[in-house]
Amino acid sequence: MLVLPACLFVVAFLVYPIMYTFYVSLYDYSPLRSAVPHYVGLDNYRWLFGSDLVRQSLTVTLAFTVASVVVEMVVGLLVAELLARFMLGARSGFAISLSKILSGVFILPFATPAVAAAVAWKMLLHPQFSPVNAVLGRSVAWFTRYPLQSVVVIDAWKMTPLVLFLLLAAIMSIEPAQFEAAKMDGASSWQEFRYITLPSILPVVAVTIAFRAVDAFTKIFDIVYMTTGGGPGNATEVFPLLIWKTAFSHLRFGQASALAVVAVLISALLAGILLVRRGAV
């Protein structure tokens, strides 16, 4: 009885929407043609698997997900290790205060709304008024010449702090006596990281990768929509944006629901593979 409210919440806001989306995916429903949905069975899924546009969008989304997660994990792990060493070595009041200030600064990108971050980066990478181009002494249309790379940079800038603090918490939970014993044995900083830090935080790393992979695959909409709109061409038309366009630009709600169901299945598959491989290791 104590967990019943939580169960009802999950059913109302997770299970029911997924089931209803699958139900709609079995119908041809386009208000422009007819107000009455027509049952078509698996036709929407046949269209999905035979569409070059869907294959292109999946390829772009997977490329974005892999690049974004790799950048975030590498940068987040590096900064978390450096910040942990600084915090553990802080002895004076100034050093302790500085470590707190740094922690607050690092969290700012994650606390910034995605739309605001996208608009800010769009101005930073503007082909004519970009301060980045001014520093480089070049005139580069970043969202035209390097559209996917630019979107990856923006997403990594925003989401790396989340990875950073998850890994920082894991590193700070390691027993300090292990590092003290390693120092007494003459271990270098790299050896401490390789043989103590990394093995100790691997479970957290695996869960973080799985979480970020699913999140990047399913939720990269606002940044792309506000910066490139899926262009140039279909170069950055990620899967969530394709679902949105299919539903609200073309008003093909049955096909959009089929796309959404496939997105949920792919996300579950990605998370399952990462977590099962971690368990096998």
Image (cartoon, rainbow, N blue to C red):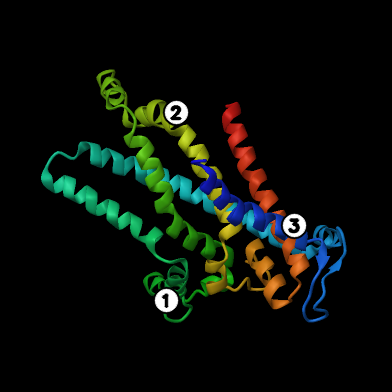
Looking at the rendered structure, the secondary structure element under dot 2 is helix
Q: Position of residue 277 (x, y in %)?
A: 61, 33
> What percent of the width, then of the height, locates residue 244?
66, 69
Question: Could you tell me residue 58's position as x and y percent?
Answer: 70, 58
- Horizontally, residue 180 falls left or right of residue 204, namely left
User: Looking at the rendering, which quadrant does residue 21 occupy?
Assistant: bottom right
At x 43% / y 71%, what residue is drawn? 116
Q: Nearer the viewer, residue 93 or 189?
A: 93
Task: Tell which tag, 1 or 3, sits nearer the viewer.
Answer: 3
- Label 1 SS: loop
- Residue at the disc numbered 1: 130
> Is residue 127 found left or right of 214 in the rendered image?
left
Q: Which residue is mark 2?
A: 199
Number of marks in the rendered image: 3
Image: 150 above or below 140 = above
- Residue for badge 3: 22
Q: Any mark on residue 159, and which?
A: none
Q: Could you say which quadrant of the image residue 117 lies in?
A: bottom left
